[in-house]
Image (tube, rainbow, N blue to C red):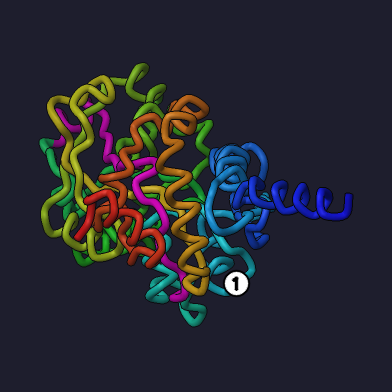
Amino acid sequence: MRHIRTFATATTLAVLPLAAFAAPVDLRLITMEPGGSWYSYGSTFSEIIQGSEGENELNVEVLPRGGGMTNPVAVSQGAADLGFVSASAAIWARDGIGEEFEGREANNALAIVGGLQLAYTTIAVRRDYVEKSGLTTFDEMVASDNPPRFVLKPAGSQVPILANYMFEALGSSLEDMRDRGAITQISTAQIAQMLRDGTADVYIENAPVGQATMSEVTLTTPMVFVPASDTVLDHMSELGAPAANMPEGSYPGQEGAYRTSMTPTILIANADMDEEVAYQLTRALVEQREKIAEAFPALAGWDPEKGAQPDQAVIELHPGAARYYRERGWIE
């Protein structure tokens, strides 16, 4: 009987799946406070990562207390292992650009997947203002002795930072334009009303196509999407907001594709993450793309192959992620 039990035990061990012997690895995924899109994405991404097959048994804790300016620093400093960030904020944090990151560079983070959600920087102007002023480009408006009234979200949003860099490319700044009486920062809920009332002329936004406020604005007020020059777009590209075409017909009043800056949402990892762990979770997320798209219509346009390219990943890829993308033939 002893030999029978020994044989049975050996047989049982032989048929156990390899996952039973996988090394457990605990990961922390930083998102944002409940109510935000990144918080919603966190639950599905963590579920996919935890169900992934590979050398490691991955466990994920979602940290719902991050944000656009917090997450790159948290991941880089090891307070989190993974995090959703805007690609532009990842660049600012990496290079210590702007007062938000000066002196606290976050250069120990690498990209896992890019291009999850493309947010376009839009410059929407009341058609009535364009017709009366004769100013048809962003550059002309900034240079005007009598500039239009720009309306932006309050501090804490990426929009004022992006707007400042746009002004900076033309030799001005947000502070300079504010001193000229051209800037109003107000809650999103009031922006559409100001444009309808004619108490604001230009609405600068950074958001995915279909964003609620921009949709309301373009449906209730005749608007024109005015272009920025290559000088502005090139400067924005250097700061992690590459040039891109917002698709034709994204909003009423948009004629043809709109050339502008784009800030992708990317998933980053601490650079010290084990390469095999990064490979395993990258493969799981990419191969569960349909599940992600089904759960979140805003991510239905995510193309993992395009997201692996420099213009959508923006920062350097983690070696584990890069290995998976090479296997797919998506990068060299």
Identity of the residue drawn at 26% across and 29% down = 126
> Residue 118 lies in magenta, yes or no?
yes
Q: Nearer the viewer, residue 231 or 332?
A: 332
Crowd tier of the residue under label 1, counting other residues whose Cα lies within 10 Å: few below 14, some 14–19, many 20 or above = some
Residue 62 higher or lower than 300, as above or below = below
The amino acid marked with disc number 1 is Gly
Q: Nearer the viewer, residue 19 or 81?
A: 19
| Image spot of residue 90 (x, y percent) | 41, 63
Is 277 left or right of 328, judged from the image as shown? Answer: right
| Image spot of residue 109 (x, y percent) | 46, 69
| Image spot of residue 87 (x, y percent) | 38, 56
> Which residue appears farthest toward the bottom when viewing the image?
103
| Image spot of residue 133 (x, y percent) | 15, 36
Residue 151 visible in this rendered orientation of the protein: no
Please name the residue that numbered disc 1 is placed on: 78
- Give the magenta part as a residue range: 107-133
- Quarter location, residue 323: bottom left
Q: Quadrant of the C terminus?
A: bottom left
Identity of the residue drawn at 88% across and 54% down = 2
> Which residue appears farthest toward the top when viewing the image?
220
